[in-house]
Image: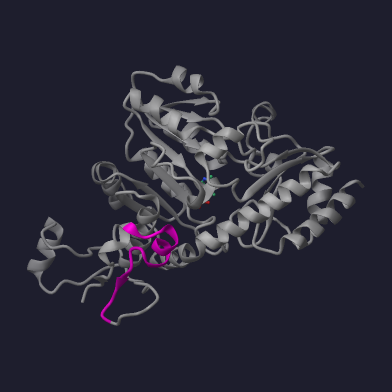
């Protein structure tokens, strides 16, 4: 028996937290409370005729888990309920989501405009991979609306951006950039990882496609890789579905199940991440050991008006520069005892990274300088620990960093 769609009709009227616990649930004949993990690659048919009908699209049902699986479908449906998206496809990683979202809709001869401040692998896809297949790209300062406008060409088909950006937490105005794109008929793809799905809704602001690394706050406990692409029925039916079906960057059912469980607790976790990040940012802003403190939730953020317009909170990440150099930053990081050194983010555990020597090492010193990624800058992904313990840890490490 196929899993039953057990969703009450009023699902669309639920508040977010309710959608994240119940949205998209499919129950099998066993009436399990927790979502089932359908660890199966294929599906059997009652008859050869049924298989024929299934392949023709006349018989609804599953064919092969490369392109559909009940557990993965539950994760997609729950994310669709959260984002207010018509359609979604889950992917094996966040980078699979970014790559598929771009490649499925572009052809040789097309042009892409993208903000320059990107997650390292996103920059590779836009700047290096797409041009290898004849898709040219122009990188712009995402904060400057004129630079988006000026970069447009007759063949511009897509815009790509992240906001807040990694690691300097700059903002891009999704609504204004979407208007510029739509004037020339280009689609806007937003990587929404740094705000989490709780704090910013790109589709409601006019973007066409939103992508996530579910590896981050959606899982939220650093266990599984995963990703998802959300957009319109038209985009998924005409472009994404067949690309996913034929090239196979699909999410494993087990990882989809972990992500589903992550979504149930996402609102309370993000509330805690943001509350702790806000408290740490305010406390750090007064410290003499710091040369710079960046947090979108503070009124001294250079784009605070845009943050208030676009986000429901300052986010789970903060960035700061130590008064000193690379050695100061390294001494500080090495002295931390609770906060661990990792390039990952969005975990229950607080994680710190030195972008200039890790995630952004590949960039030239000139480009790093342009992006504000100095040698004394660190990025902190605030976890779920007691914030007083995090402050004590940072306090002793700042003292140790003085050398
Ligand atoms: C982590 C991350 C990605 C890539 O996601 P993976 O799941 O690691 O492949 C893409 N964009 C942003 C902003 C990220 O933080």
Q: Quadrant of residue 298?
A: top right
Examine the rendered structure and indicate whether residue 291 appears above or below residue 225.
above
The percent position of residue 371, horizontal first and vertical second, equals 64, 30
The residue that appears at 46% across and 49% down in the rendered structure is: 212
Query: Residue farthest to the right?
Result: 403
Image quarter in which the N terminus is found? bottom left
The residue that appears at 40% across and 31% down in the rendered structure is: 178
Is any part of residue 66 visible from this angle?
Answer: no
Residue 102 is inside the magenta segment: no
Comparing 90 with 290, the one in front is: 290
Examine the rendered structure and indicate whether residue 69 appears above or below residue 209.
below
Is any part of residue 316 visible from this angle?
Answer: yes
The residue that appears at 90% across and 46% down in the rendered structure is: 402
The percent position of residue 307, horizontal first and vertical second, equals 56, 38
The answer to whether 219 appears left or right of 69 in the picture is right
Comparing 10 with 250, the one in front is: 10
Examine the rendered structure and indicate whether residue 164 appears above or below residue 73.
above
Residue 14 is inside the magenta segment: yes
The percent position of residue 248, horizontal first and vertical second, equals 34, 53
The residue that appears at 36% across and 71% down in the rendered structure is: 39
Magenta residues span: 13-29
The colour mode here is one colour
């Amino acid at each position: 028996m196929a899993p039953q769609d057990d969703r009450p009709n009023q699902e669309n009227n639920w508040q977010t937290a309710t959608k994240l616990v119940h949205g998209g649930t499919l129950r099998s004949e066993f009436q399990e409370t927790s979502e089932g993990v359908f660890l199966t690659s294929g599906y059997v048919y009652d008859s050869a005729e049924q298989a024929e009908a299934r392949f023709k699209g006349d018989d609804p049902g599953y064919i092969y888990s490369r392109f559909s699986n009940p557990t993965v479908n539950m994760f997609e449906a729950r994310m669709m309920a959260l984002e207010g998206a018509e359609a979604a496809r889950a992917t094996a990683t966040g980078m699979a989501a970014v790559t598929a979202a771009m490649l499925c809709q572009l052809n040789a001869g097309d042009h892409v405009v993208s903000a320059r401040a990107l997650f390292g692998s996103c920059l590779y896809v836009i700047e290096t991979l797409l041009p290898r297949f004849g898709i040219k790209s122009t990188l712009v300062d995402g904060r400057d609306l004129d630079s988006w406008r000026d970069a447009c060409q007759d063949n511009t088909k897509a815009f790509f951006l992240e906001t807040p950006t990694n690691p300097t937490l700059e903002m891009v105005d999704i609504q204004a950039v979407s208007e510029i794109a739509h004037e020339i008929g280009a689609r806007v793809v937003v990587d929404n990882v740094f705000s989490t799905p709780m704090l910013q809704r790109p589709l409601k602001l006019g973007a066409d496609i939103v992508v996530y690394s579910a590896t981050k706050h959606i899982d939220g406990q650093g266990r599984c890789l995963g990703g998802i692409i959300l957009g319109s029925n038209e985009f998924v039916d005409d472009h994404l579905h067949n690309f996913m079906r034929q090239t196979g960057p699909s999410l494993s059912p087990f990882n989809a199940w972990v992500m589903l469980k992550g979504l149930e607790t996402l609102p309370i976790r993000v509330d805690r991440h943001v509350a702790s990040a806000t408290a740490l940012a305010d406390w750090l802003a007064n410290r003499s050991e710091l040369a710079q403190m960046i947090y979108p939730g503070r009124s001294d953020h250079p784009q605070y008006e845009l943050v208030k317009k676009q986000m429901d909170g300052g986010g789970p990440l903060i960035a700061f520069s130590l008064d000193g150099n690379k050695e100061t930053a390294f001494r500080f990081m090495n002295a931390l005892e609770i906060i661990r050194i990792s390039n990952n983010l969005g975990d229950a555990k607080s994680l710190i990274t030195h972008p200039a020597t890790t995630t952004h090492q590949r960039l030239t010193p000139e480009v790093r300088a342009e992006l504000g990624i100095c040698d004394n800058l660190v990025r902190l992904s605030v976890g779920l620990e007691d914030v007083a313990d995090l402050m004590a840890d940072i306090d002793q490490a700042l003292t140790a960093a003085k050398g």
